[in-house]
Structure formats: structure tokens, C-alpha cells
Amino acid sequence: MSIESNHMADSPAPLTPPDCDLQDFPFMPLQVARLRDSDMAATESPEACWYAVMLWAASWHQVPAASLPDDDAILTKLCGLGRDVKTFRKHRDGALRGFVKCSDGRIYHAVVAEQANAAWAEKAAYRERKAQRIESAQKAAKARWGNTESNTSADAEAMRDACEAHAEGNAQRIETAMPKGTGTGTGTGTGNKEKEVVAAQRAARLPKDFVVPPDWLEWAETERGWMRRDAETEAAAFCDFWHAKGGKDAAKLDWLATWRNWVRNSRRQSSQQQGRWIDDYPPGHSGVPL
């Protein structure tokens, strides 16, 4: 075994799972007071501090999250220095403050890893909840449309699409996605089934007792990096607006799509961007390390 191999064997294990992928998480927790009052901010050069923040941000979207390749040329580029390795090496120690090399050959930042592990656990929990909703939707679809085992592969794919739509509460997508001929009825399909499809495609106002479902809120949190209270506040504004709206524009075919467009067009900042830092973190979220 070489000296390098011995060194790697003595290194700590990676600080995040090898498949920890947060590339669809645009938001990384950053505790401003901790950064402002840190020893790094007090003792390192402004350039080193800036490069450190750039590397924290870069590590958030690496796989595994919270890690970076131990390669000066790549780190130089991630700092925004292009090919200027000489400048990077001048500030390297300060920029990599808090990073440690692990047994997989990559460097990890311990507290960024803490944040990444918390976010990864939340992502896994969301996937589990979605899987449970789809399983429930599949059971509901079979109860509603009957056994589809004899359908073609295209029909089976359409059934899966309909089940996902059912899990999201999107009635119009369910009816459009369902393969023709499915159902428990008989005849040519011009009876109650046709009426259901026509009804599903008719625009309607937002019901007065409507409450934005939890999975819609979760989607908004992921899409915009909001905390739950941000999504709930935006949901209240969404409902108030459409309940007060008059005229034909207040009727929509697809309220889920309307919600998604509302969230994408919102100018709301996250609670942390507005200055509410510590109280909004879920347990274990202590901010980015220094």
C-alpha cells in the first residue's frame, strides 16, 4: 500500500451519503450573524472570505452535497477565478477553512454537510410521502375504473399518469390521462363517463372552503426555497385573491397549474431573506459553518 493509500485509509468517512444530490434545492441555509462574527471574517483576507462563501455554495450542488474535488484547478474555477490558480493558492488556506479531506478523496465542510444531511432527509421523507399518495391513488383508480391488467402498455402508462394526477388532486388531468375504454361501465362510452370528462374540463371558481393541500405547499417550498410559513402565507394570499376576483377570469380549468404559476411569479422572499433566521430553521438547521 502506498503512502497516499495509507493516508486515505486514515481519513474520515465521507460526511454525506454518496447519492446525496441537492441540485434541485436552490436555497442553502446561511446564518448571517455567525458569519459576521466569525474568526474567519475577523482574521482572513476579504478575498479568502469571498472564495470560502463561493466554495460553500458550490459544494451544496456537488454530488455528494457538501463536498468538493481536491483539485486546485477546479476549485479555482468554482471560486470564479477562471484559470488563475496562482491567485487561488495565495488564499487557499483561508478559502478552505473548515474543509477536511475524507476517505473518498474529496473534501467536505462539516457544517455544510450537517445542512445537506438535514435537507437530504427532508427530500427522502417527501419522496416517501409522494409514493404513499400514489399508492393510495392507484387503489382509488382501480376502485373507480376497474381492473386494467388487460390494457396495452400505453394504457398502463396512461393509468400511472392518472394515478399521479389523482395524488395531486387534479381532476381534469385524471380524466384526460385515463386510457379510452377504461372503467367499470359498458357500452360505447357516451354515458356518465363522457359527462364526467366534460364536467372535468369545465372551468370553475376556487371553492370557498378551499385549503391549499400540503403537497402543493411542499412543491412551493422546493421551487422557491421557502420555509413552510412562507408557503402558507402565500397560500392565504392566493385564496384571498381568487375568492375576491370577479368575472370569467376567476374560473380556471386547472387550479394546481394556477397555483404553480402564482408561486413562480411571486416576489415573496424567504423568511431568512427577510431577516427571520433562527426560529424558522427545522431541528438541526444551524446555518452554514465558519
Image (tube, helix red, strand yellow):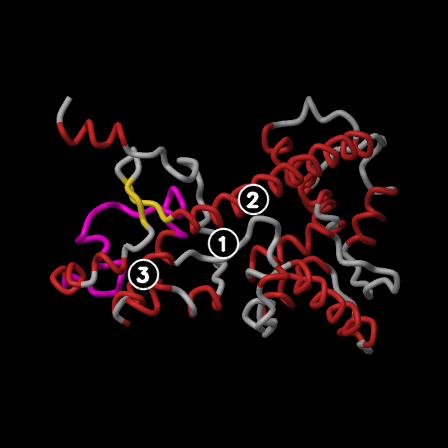
Amino acid residing under circle 2: Lys
Q: Residues within 10 Å of mark 3 (few under 14, many from 20)?
A: many
Give yes or no for residue 59 being in the magenta stretch.
no
Q: Which residues are magenta?
A: 60-84
**Residue 15: image location, x then y, percent:** 40, 39
Q: Examine the image and state in which quarter residue 149 appears.
A: top right
At horizontal 73% and vertical 50% (from top left) the residue drawn is: 170
- Classify 201 as above or below 3: below
Relative to 137, 87 lies left or right: left
Query: The residue under label 3 is which amino acid type?
Result: Ala
In terms of secondary structure, where does tag 2 sit?
helix
Look at 57% across and 72% down and name the residue there.
275
Q: Quadrant of residue 37?
A: bottom left
Q: Marks 3 and 1: which is nearer the front?
A: 3
Q: Earlier in the sequence, mark 1 or mark 2?
A: 1
Where is 84 relative to 213, above or below? below
Helix, strand or loop for disc 1? loop
Q: Which mark is residue 123?
A: 2
3 or 1: tag closer to the N-terminus:
1
Give the residue number, with chain letter if any, for mark 3: 52
Left or right relative to 116: residue 175:
right
Residue in front for this viewpoint, 110 or 152: 110
Quadrant (top left, top right, bottom left, bottom right) of the N terminus: top left
Mark 1 is on which residue type? Phe
Cα separation between marks 1 and 2: 10 Å
From the viewer's side, name the closer residue of 13 and 165.
13
For residue 25, the mark is 1
